[in-house]
Image (cartoon, helix red, strand yellow):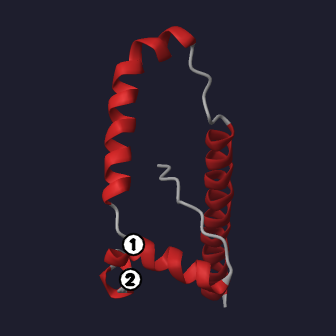
């Protein structure tokens, strides 16, 4: 009987630890996301202007080459496990949170 009690307490502790970690991860993610977008000083924007223009031009070219027909057939079996999980969550109506890898 004592062994069963200890096993149940052990499982409860692990379950509680898991729930606490989930709450902490969610809080970390919310804290990080609340800081975006960052305010970038105007002088830094000016210094990066040529690079920003180059990136925007590249994206613009890629957008003009994009053809939606390339993605007509979706094969979920080809998705990595994280995407399969996100897709199944979206289809079931549940929310998907990106896990925060805390030690």
| Secondary structure beneath label 2 | loop
| Residue ID for mark 1 | 68
| Secondary structure beneath label 1 | helix
**What residue lies at 30% left-to-right and 82% top-to-bottom?**
78
Hey, which quadrant is residue 67 in on the image?
Answer: bottom left
Q: How many marks?
A: 2
Hey, which quadrant is residue 7 in on the image?
Answer: bottom right
In the picture as drawn, the residue positioned furthest to the top comes out as: 43
| Residue ID for mark 2 | 72
Q: Is residue 5 above or below residue 103?
A: below
Please tell me how crowded label 2 is: few (under 14), some (14-19), or many (20+) other residues with Cα within 10 Å. Answer: few
Q: Is residue 52 left or right of residue 100?
A: left
**What residue lies at 68% left-to-right and 67% top-to-bottom?**
16
Task: Give x and y (percent) for residue 91.
Answer: 60, 84
Disc number placed over residue 59 in the picture, else none: none
Please tell me how crowded label 1 is: few (under 14), some (14-19), or many (20+) other residues with Cα within 10 Å. Answer: few
Where does the N terminus fall, quadrant-wise?
bottom right
Front-lying residue, 92 or 74: 74
In the picture as drawn, the residue positioned furthest to the front comes out as: 64
**What residue lies at 67% left-to-right and 65% top-to-bottom?**
19
Task: Give x and y (percent) for residue 65.
Answer: 30, 58
**What residue lies at 61% left-to-right and 58% top-to-bottom?**
21
Q: Is residue 51 left or right of residue 82?
A: left
Task: Give x and y (percent) for residue 11.
Answer: 61, 77
Front-lying residue, 26 or 45: 45
Marks 1 and 2: in contact by CB < 8 Å? yes
Q: Is residue 84 above or below residue 63?
A: below
């Amino acid at each position: 009987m004592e062994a069963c009690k200890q096993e149940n307490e052990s499982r409860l502790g692990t379950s509680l630890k898991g729930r606490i970690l989930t709450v902490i991860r969610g809080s970390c993610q919310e804290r990080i996301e609340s800081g975006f977008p960052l305010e970038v000083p105007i002088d830094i924007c000016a210094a990066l202007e040529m690079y920003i223009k180059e990136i925007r031009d590249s994206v613009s070219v890629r957008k003009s080459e994009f053809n939606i027909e390339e993605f007509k057939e979706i094969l979920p079996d080809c998705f990595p496990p994280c995407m399969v999980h996100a897709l199944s969550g979206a289809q079931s109506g549940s929310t998907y949170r990106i896990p925060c890898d805390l030690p």
